[in-house]
Image: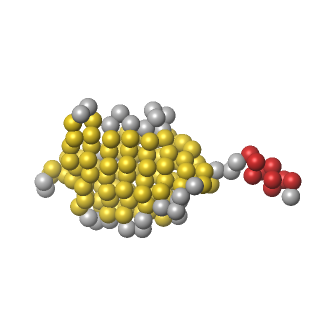
Amino acid sequence: MKNVKIGFSMAMNGEKTATFTANGKISQNQLVFTDDENTVYRFELSPTEVILHKTGTSLIEMTFQDKQITYGTLSTDGLQFDLVIYTKELLAEDGTIYLTYELLDGDTVISHHSLYVNWTPKIERKDLEQTWLN
């Protein structure tokens, strides 16, 4: 896994709910990082699907597929809620995840969400020193 620098932003119904930077790791198809509240975000990535596993005070698992209805779960305080998700837009490539989606109750939209994650290689001090020595 490679070390990366993460930029994260999330909004619900047009209001920002989280914005932060973090250090993370990426492998061929998985991005993992932790926020300041020790919530772990793990994204499984493919060009057509993103799966989010979020572990902290609550557990969330959500699957996103562009212009598709998919499902997820939210577990908190011993209760589990099933989620119905309509992904309006999905982009997962070139160091970026961009999602806009809605949570549904039947045909009724409960809430609108957007999520943006970007990452760049983290330059380690030892790598800089090696570059200067050569």
In the displayed structure, would residue 54 be above or below residue 1? above
Left or right of 55, for residue 106: left
In the displayed structure, would residue 81 be above or below residue 45? above
Image quadrant for the N terminus?
Answer: bottom right
In the displayed structure, would residue 94 be above or below residue 40? below
* Residue at the image position 38 percent from the left and 59 percent from the top: 50
Extreme residue in the left direction: 106
Foreground residue, 121 or 16? Answer: 121
x and y, in percent, of residue 108 in the image: 14, 52
* Residue at the image position 32 percent from the left and 65 percent from the top: 66
x and y, in percent, of residue 63 in the image: 31, 57
Can residue 116 be seen here? no
Can residue 79 be seen here? yes
Foreground residue, 13 or 63? Answer: 63
Rendered image quadrant of residue 90:
bottom left
x and y, in percent, of residue 113 in the image: 32, 49
Image quadrant for the C terminus?
Answer: bottom right
* Residue at the image position 13 percent from the left and 54 percent from the top: 106
Extreme residue in the bottom direction: 47
Foreground residue, 99 or 50? Answer: 50
* Residue at the image position 81 percent from the left and 53 percent from the top: 130
Left or right of 55, for residue 25: right
